[in-house]
Image (cartoon, rainbow, N blue to C red):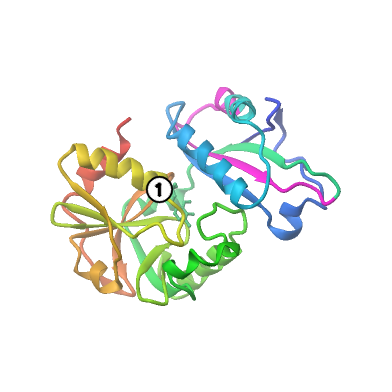
Amino acid sequence: MMLLATLDGNLHDPNSPLIRVDDLGVLRGEGVFETLLVVSGQVRDLSEHLARLQVSAHLSDMTTPPIAAWHRGIDAVLTAWREPAEMVLRLTATRGSETGAQPTCFVTGTQVPEKIRQQREGISVLTLDRGHSGAAAATLPWLLTGVKSISYAVNMSALRYARAHGADDALFVGTDGHVLEGATAAVVVARGDTLITPPEDGILPSITVRRLFHHAALDGWTTEESPLTRTDLIAADGVWLVSSVRLLAPVTSIDSGKIRISSDHDRLLGLLRQN
Ligand SMILES: Cc1ncc(COP(=O)(O)O)c(C=O)c1O
């Protein structure tokens, strides 16, 4: 089931075409997006996602409609959604057609894919070289590494490569050996009572990590951003791929070497799920 709305608040048949063939989102993958989790009608971290969408658009030299317009599209999808309790809400803004300056914007609502539900139970990862370091990415803004761009062909290619080599997901590592992020997720490790995530250089700033760290700090955890290597991950008490829809996927193997799921997994998941 898919629901589709435009920012005027109108619902559309998702089986009918909506986008022009000369849209730069179609021709060149130019655009930005956000993926959010809705639980029992409540959108999680909506203002944070809308703010990141605006930042992504700004860094891509694009305009996006005001927040109020996005709310019209989102409300249309939320109102029409019937069961199940969880929904994936996706906000997309492309650069628009070559001849017009207006972005093409739409909102979709779909079920959480079964594969993602399974990954909440455990996930195997393959480390892949990203071809640059996180620190170098800060000097290469045209790579759009901190932007949630619709150009995910490289991320999807990494995912396919990982799957072809027996893993569920890819984990990017910089040329300096520092762990960066998953193909569609951030990384968090537990070391004692400390939760660690890599610095935000050259990666997408994760809203889920921010939410987790906020609640974990209130629960007595220490939280920090520090460089992590593959060896650090293998030695950690727990490793997770973290994202808005997947939530907290415990990593069970790195490059075919098994690692244990942290005994704190359920506690951390409980913290992440709370409002
Ligand atoms: C490349 C990448 N990094 C990190 C994340 C995690 O971001 P968030 O927690 O805001 O969903 C995502 C989520 O889609 C992603 O695609």
Image quarter of residue 134? bottom left
The residue drawn where x is 57% and y is 59% is 144
How many numbered marks does the figure carry? 1
Image quarter of residue 40? top left
The residue drawn where x is 36% and y is 67% is 179
Q: Work out whether 140 lies above or below 117.
A: below
Return the residue nearer the eye: 201 or 70.
201
Neighbourhood count class around disc 1 (C-alpha, 10 Å): few under 14, some 14–19, many 20 upward: some
Quarter of the C terminus within the rendering: top left
For residue 205, say whether it is visible.
Answer: yes
- Left or right: residue 74 versus residue 214 is right
Q: Residue furthest front?
A: 139
Q: Residue furthest right?
A: 99
Return the residue nearer the eye: 248 or 178.
178
Magenta-span inclusion, residue 275: no
Quarter of the N terminus within the rendering: top right
The magenta segment: 77-98
The residue drawn where x is 34% and y is 40% is 211
Residue at the disc numbered 1: 117
Magenta-span inclusion, residue 91: yes
Mark 1 residue CB less than 8 A from any atom of ligand 1: no
Q: Work out whether 146 lies above or below 104.
A: below
The residue drawn where x is 29% and y is 66% is 228
Q: Circle 1 — which element? A: helix
Return the residue nearer the eye: 141 or 219.
141
> Residue 113's spot in the image, x, y percent?
49, 47
> Residue 208's spot in the image, x, y percent?
38, 45
| Amino acid tagged 1 | Arg
Q: Work out whether 131 lies above or below 179.
A: below
For residue 1, say whether it is visible.
Answer: no
> Residue 221's spot in the image, x, y percent?
17, 46
> Residue 81's spot in the image, x, y percent?
55, 27
